[in-house]
């Protein structure tokens, strides 16, 4: 059994996805919502590829290979789709701390200012615990943090997606402050976030110019106070 990806013959087994098959021969397909530790959800559509004979582009993270399928990962149609997805994401949120997305944008020639006159999402920065901050102005709704908090890693279910359409957002249940949720501050959500929307306090304080010693001191005091309250 084999497929042809970008002209290369790739031996595959039936359970493989196109993404996995491509990786076998060193072809990197851009992706956003998919992560090696999480179940692919085909949410972001950045990994779409062209499958000869298929009516639509297919998401490589979930589409299984079929014998002799001919797949293009860099056709003009694919690149146009990726370009538009990235331009639309940039129209509502701040991608400045999402290096992978910025690199993909450069690769496909996306104009991140294309829809700059559209409505942007605005949220307060949630700083309600000593461990991490949440800045959903940078959130692309990839869902990785929700998956990591739930069935894919921690089984804690402190996070969910609330709202509809443009107003969809990552949230806690009943919009509670994080310390009042089931969150155990494991840090898995921060580790999988690709955009800097979730950030460890230490990282934020370093960016603000504090020395490691000052951060250590401040964190120690914050944590002491926090544990005393609880
Ligand atoms: S906070 Fe980060 S991981 Fe969670 S949905 Fe937004 S971008 Fe994805």
Image (cartoon, rainbow, N blue to C red):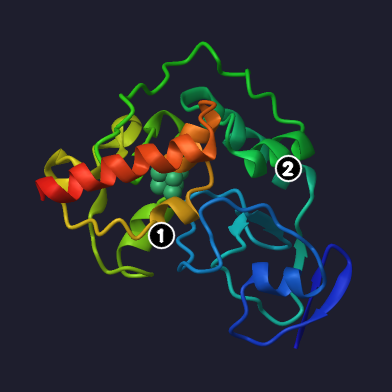
Marks 1 and 2, how far apart at CA: 32 Å
Q: Is residue 196 visible?
A: no
Residue 122: which quarter of the image? top left
- Counting from the top left corner in percent of width and height, residue 71 is at 75, 64
* Mark 1 vs 2: CB contact within 8 A: no
- Under tag 2, what secondary structure? helix
Q: In front: mark 1 or mark 2?
A: 1
Residue pictured at 32% horizontal, 35% vertical: 165
**Disc 2: CA contacts within 10 A as few (<14), some (14-19) or many (>=20):** many
Q: Residue at x 68, y 56 (%)?
A: 49
Q: What label does residue 79 carry, if any?
A: 2
Determine which residue is flagged by label 1: 188
Q: Is residue 227 left or right of residue 67?
A: left
Residue 210 visible at all: yes
Q: Quadrant of the N terminus?
A: bottom right
Residue drawn at 52 percent across, 40 percent down:
212
């Amino acid at each position: 059994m084999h497929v042809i990806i970008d002209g290369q013959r790739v031996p595959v087994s039936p359970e493989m996805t196109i993404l996995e098959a491509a990786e076998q021969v060193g072809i990197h397909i851009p992706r956003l919502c998919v992560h090696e530790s999480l179940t692919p959800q085909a949410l972001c559509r950045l990994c779409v590829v062209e499958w000869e004979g298929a009516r639509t582009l297919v998401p490589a993270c979930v589409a299984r290979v079929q014998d002799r399928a001919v797949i293009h990962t860099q056709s003009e149609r694919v690149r146009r789709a990726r370009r538009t997805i990235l331009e639309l994401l940039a129209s509502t949120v701040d991608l400045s701390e999402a290096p992978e997305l910025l690199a993909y944008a450069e690769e496909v020639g996306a104009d991140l200012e294309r829809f700059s006159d559209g409505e942007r999402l605005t949220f307060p920065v949630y700083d309600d615990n000593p461990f991490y901050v949440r800045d959903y102005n940078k959130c692309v709704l990839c869902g990785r943090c929700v998956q990591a908090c739930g069935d894919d890693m921690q089984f804690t279910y402190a996070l969910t997606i609330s709202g509809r359409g443009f107003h969809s957002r990552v949230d806690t249940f009943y919009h509670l402050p994080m310390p009042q949720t089931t969150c155990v501050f494991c840090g898995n959500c921060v580790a999988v976030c690709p955009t800097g929307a979730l950030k460890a306090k230490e990282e934020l304080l370093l960016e603000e110019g504090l020395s490691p010693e000052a951060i250590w001191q401040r964190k120690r005091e914050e944590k002491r106070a926090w544990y005393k309250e609880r």
